[in-house]
Amino acid sequence: MKPTKLYGLHSIQAALDYSPKKINKAWIDAQRQDKRLAQAIDDLLDLGIEPEKVDRKKLDKLAESNNHQGIVIEVDMPAELSENDLKNAVENLTAMALFLVLDNVQDPHNLGACLRSADATGVHGVIITKDNATGITPTVCKVASGAAETVPVYQVTNLSRTLRWLKEQGIWVMGAAGEATQTLYQTDFNLPLALVVGAEGKGMRRLTREQCDVLVKLPMLGQVESLNLSVATGVLLYEVLRQRLSQ
């Protein structure tokens, strides 16, 4: 766990709803008074946490000049691991590799659901991008139902470079793409694997796609063009698991 500062009424309310036992401290604007802030303060007091009243300058510093809406809290969140941690994990694997790679996924509900599926299917770690993507938040932890604590999450700055390194370690990179010519049911997943899923509505970025050894798709027999990202990820991971268990 790592102490993380959260700010803004929406983020604070998510922490109060989903991770109340992980909140350590709180700071509030001594001058600000409004109904939503007052409710958040009452909720914190119910937890036995008395917010420290500070001036706006102190809050600005705590929130790193982001819009805090008069409140900042410190909460214990599962730590995101680094690229070096990923390299150590890959080098020390004793089982056939299975990593889930999420390219710029921004919805915390999707990340949480993907973590839950990853835990259930034996994924060795989830790789996420550092920029333009959600990290571990209270909402992610709630949706993941404990999987945010059990599945390692590796945050990388250059996904294309990371995928290239994984391939150098003998790990196949397979991307999910609607335009792929083969379906997941025509694909052999019994090999060291990094499964890549792109962002909501956009799919994989070009540089990410170029690192893929194989593209696969889910057969779609109805009128909708695609499944929800986390649902598609669950289907893919369970086909990987099915094939591996059948061996």
Image: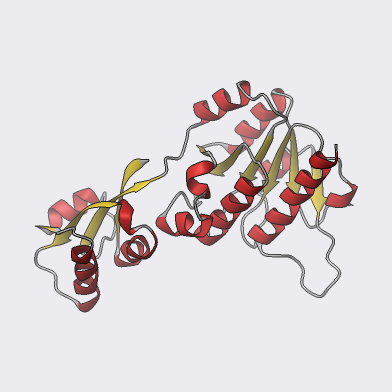
State the residue at coordinates (42%, 53%): 137
Please report the residue visible at 63 percent of the width from the left and 43 percent of the height from the top: 101
Q: Residue furthest bottom?
A: 35
Residue 20: image location, x then y, percent: 32, 59
Quarter residue 31 falls in: bottom left
Q: How many marks?
A: 0
* Residue 216 x %, y %: 81, 49
Q: Is 196 on the left-hand or right-hand side of 38?
A: right
The residue closer to the viewer here, 176 or 240, is 240
Name the one closer to the observer, 245 or 170.
Answer: 245
Residue occupying image coordinates x 16% and y 61%: 28
What residue is at 75 percent from the left and 31 percent from the top? Answer: 192
Q: Is residue 195 left or right of residue 17?
A: right
Residue 15's place in the image compared with 166, above or below, is: below
* Residue 45 in the image, given as x and y percentages of width and height: 18, 64
Q: Is residue 3 above or below residue 235?
A: above
The answer to whether residue 130 is seen in the rendering is: no
On screen, 196 above or below 84?
A: below
Side of 236 relative to 83 (left or right): right
Residue farthest top in this picture: 91
Task: Determine the image quadrant of residue 193.
Answer: top right
Residue 55 in the image: x percent, y percent?
10, 57
Above or below, 193 relative to 179: above
Q: Is residue 2 visible?
A: yes
Q: Is residue 244 left or right of residue 64?
A: right
Q: Quadrant of the N terminus?
A: top left
